[in-house]
Amino acid sequence: MFPIVSAFGAGIFPVGLDVPAPPSVEPAALKAALRHLVGSVSVVTSGEGAERTGATVTSAYGLSVDPAAMIVAINRDSSSYQTIRRFGHFCVNVLAEGQEDVANRFAGFGGIKGAERYQGRSWTVRASGAPVLEDALLSIDCVLEDEIRKFSHAIFVGRVVSVDVREGRALLYGNGAYGALERPAAAE
């Protein structure tokens, strides 16, 4: 045990193996519960040429605006994990409404892998060298700063080196389906 200072004041809180943790829920129960979360759909891309790969995620978030930083959780068994580590870059391509085909390709539907996932769309690169989807709603280009490995995933922290923003509505995913938010009518 060691002292911890929190928003509620200083105190001694047990840390470590001497405190029994409650049992975890079954993975299937958590997976079923998480289906109800709605998130924006992003394709996280990395690599160069024939060594490009990517993954569809709803786990990409802004970490900080000063300094500009993003975080993304990637399964350590995926090809994207090794590619991000090897090339030291990634791009968070937030998909627009109507880009379900891109989400499905990068989710591996139809057995499509690696650089084949990039076919049928226009791609470019920005400052980091990571692939950028030219018609994504927004693209956040990052240089890898840090990696936190926990359980089946790694959280990558990226320093943002360029941002592209376009007009449109974000593609959302929740409860097993794609969608988009309706914009409220403008007040007169």
Image (cartoon, rainbow, N blue to C red):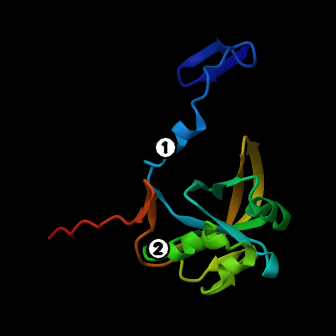
User: Quick check: 145 left or right of 4?
Assistant: right
**Residue at numbered disc 1:** 32
Q: Which residue is mark 2?
A: 96
Q: Residue furthest right?
A: 86
> Could you tell me the amino acid type at mark 2?
Ala
Could you say where residue 152 lies in the image, as x and y percent from the top left? 72, 45
Task: Give the residue drawn at x 60%, y 69%.
Answer: 109
Q: Is residue 18 left or right of residue 22?
A: right
Residue at the spot x=69%, y=68% of the render?
Answer: 54
Q: Nearer the viewer, residue 10 or 172?
A: 172
Give the class, few, some or many, for how many residues have Cα within 10 Å of label 2's Cα (few <14, many ≥20): many
Residue 26 at x, y percent in the picture? 58, 33
> Percent x, y for residue 155?
70, 50
Report the residue at 79% width, 78% height from top: 48
Indicate the position of residue 170 as horizontal and vertical percent values.
44, 68
Q: Quadrant of the C terminus?
A: bottom left
Q: Is residue 91 among what the camera can see?
A: no
Q: Amino acid at mark 1?
A: Ala
Q: Label 2, label 1: how many angstroms apart (C-alpha)?
A: 26 Å
Q: Secondary structure under badge 1?
A: helix
